[in-house]
């Protein structure tokens, strides 16, 4: 559809072309809104099964950029001829992506000859957005089909630039080797995600019911639990059986052995493995409770945190003490975003709804007496969505933050906010890892 639009640009004033351009603009915007979700999926892609798709998307977007940028030049020349740029000196009118273009100029024009021309175009784009928007604000949309088509063309172009940047970043990400600690963290998160899913919950519920039925409804002894756990190897796909038997009690080692499997296992087999690991960890948690009855602590209100991690119960009282220590390390309410990001990175967050986290943190069982300057809401956390990914704070970087900050017009934010937040996250993370709420 993009190539058709490029070929038929001279007919842009037709009703059909105007409609098609608007449709492309909407689709581009929707894809851009999915970037954060796609990034989170990529960061959980332990087997790198998405690598080939990312490369393909990047190449296809890169291929279309040259004819699309040439069309941008043509549209600019036409705008000059029709004096659409007469309001370039007008005050800025903020639009989605209007400030994005200068930050993406190096992604276009692979040849030296085109480079200067592209930079000239990108330098003008924010002003062109504002000029067109000012014109549209003075006239009826129905009276200016050409200007409306150009506006949609520029918005679509901005969306393609952002998507190109995104897949270029993913291509670089998948080229980096993952270390054992990171691999273990990713696998832990994937297992917890499977358990939290509707399919995972139903499968685990059925597994527990079958065990209970086969033992006449009686609680299983430690010996019986271990016997049931040994039987799980029969459910493991053959490609994973050796690494499962060798490393099931060490998530980092298990994850690294999975990464090394070639050829890559298919997605169905990997999901089956996650299901078996979840069952193994459920039994391991029951065994731990047999050996450490003190771990069955009195319940405190909890809706957002996982109650177990890697086959052991999470000590909620200790987790509360850790968060209390973290609170002592922050001095602004927006620093709660860093606490939330660290807890999510370490796979403690079960319910990702920011409002629920804010409500629980200020519940009378947790921290009801927060000082006024530290009281926060879900909006305090979601304000940073799209700029800083709350799943993996170590991957925050200046380039991505700047593109989204300027692209969404967040001028009040400091260019170094991402770095200040990241440094605080590292300090909070050290506090969390040293305290080990998932240990007794």
Image (cartoon, grey):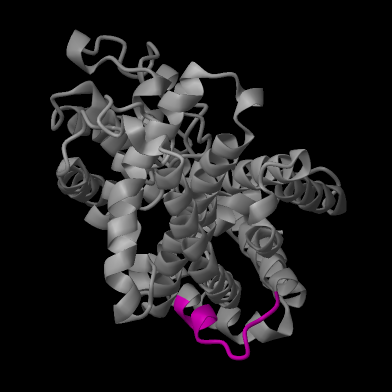
Which residue is the extreme one toward the bottom? 262
- What x and y, as percent, mark residue 154? 49, 46
Q: Looking at the image, which is closer to me, 409 or 141? A: 141
Looking at the image, residue 36 sits to the left or right of residue 270; the answer is left
Which quadrant holds residue 333?
A: top left
Magenta-span inclusion, residue 351: no
Residue in the picture at 27% in, 14% down = 375
Q: Looking at the image, which is closer to me, 438 or 424? A: 424
Can residue 217 be seen from the camera position used here? yes
Tell me the chief SS of the magenta region: loop
Up/down of 23 relative to 396, above or below? above
- What x and y, as percent, mark residue 234? 76, 76
Which quadrant holds residue 84?
A: top left
Looking at the image, residue 98 sits to the left or right of residue 310; the answer is left
Residue in the picture at 22% in, 54% down = 398
Up/down of 253 relative to 27, above or below? below
Magenta-span inclusion, residue 263: yes
Provide the residue span drawn in magenta: 256-266
Can residue 47 be seen from the camera position used here? no
Q: Quadrant of the N terminus?
A: bottom right
Q: Looking at the image, which is closer to me, 51 or 374? A: 51
- What x and y, as percent, mark residue 24? 65, 48
Which residue is the extreme one toward the front? 81
């Amino acid at each position: 559809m993009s190539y058709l639009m490029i070929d038929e640009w001279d007919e842009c004033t037709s009703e059909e072309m105007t409609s098609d351009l608007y449709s492309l603009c909407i689709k581009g915007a929707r894809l851009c809104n999915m970037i954060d979700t796609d990034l989170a999926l990529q960061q959980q892609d332990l087997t790198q099964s998405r690598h080939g798709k990312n490369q393909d998307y990047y190449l296809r977007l890169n291929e279309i950029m040259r004819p699309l940028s040439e069309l941008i030049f043509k549209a600019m020349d036409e705008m000059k001829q029709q004096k659409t740029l007469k309001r370039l000196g007008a005050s800025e009118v903020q639009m989605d992506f209007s400030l994005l273009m200068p930050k993406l100029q190096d992604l276009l024009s692979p040849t030296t000859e085109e480079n200067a021309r592209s930079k000239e175009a990108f330098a003008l784009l924010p002003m062109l957005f504002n000029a067109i928007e000012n014109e549209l604000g003075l006239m009826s949309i129905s009276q200016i089909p050409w200007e409306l088509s150009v506006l949609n063309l520029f918005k679509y172009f901005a969306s393609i630039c952002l998507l190109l940047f995104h897949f270029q970043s993913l291509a670089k990400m998948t080229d980096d080797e993952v270390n054992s600690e990171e691999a273990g963290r990713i696998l832990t998160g994937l297992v917890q995600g499977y358990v939290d899913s509707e399919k995972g919950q139903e499968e685990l519920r059925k597994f527990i019911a079958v065990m209970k039925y086969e033992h006449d409804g009686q609680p299983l002894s430690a010996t019986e639990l271990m016997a049931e756990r040994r039987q799980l190897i029969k459910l493991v796909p053959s490609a994973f059986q050796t690494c499962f038997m060798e490393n099931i009690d060490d998530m980092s080692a298990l994850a690294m052995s999975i990464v090394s499997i070639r050829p890559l296992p298919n997605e169905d087999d990997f999901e089956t493995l996650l299901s078996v690991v979840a069952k193994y960890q459920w039994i391991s948690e029951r065994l731990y409770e047999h050996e450490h009855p003190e771990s069955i602590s009195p319940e405190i209100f909890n809706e957002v945190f996982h109650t177990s991690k890697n086959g052991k119960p999470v000590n909620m009282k200790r987790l509360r003490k850790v968060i209390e220590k973290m609170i002592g390390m922050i001095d602004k309410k927006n620093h709660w975003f860093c606490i939330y990001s660290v807890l999510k990175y370490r796979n403690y967050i079960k319910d990702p709804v920011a409002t629920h986290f804010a409500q629980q943190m200020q519940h009378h069982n947790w921290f009801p007496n927060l000082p006024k300057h530290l009281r926060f809401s879900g909006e305090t956390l979601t304000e940073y969505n799209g700029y800083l990914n709350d799943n993996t704070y170590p991957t925050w970087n200046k380039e991505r933050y700047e593109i989204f900050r300027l692209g969404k017009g967040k001028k009040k934010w400091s260019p170094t906010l991402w770095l200040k937040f990241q440094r605080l996250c590292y300090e909070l993370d050290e506090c969390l890892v040293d305290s080990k709420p998932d240990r007794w």
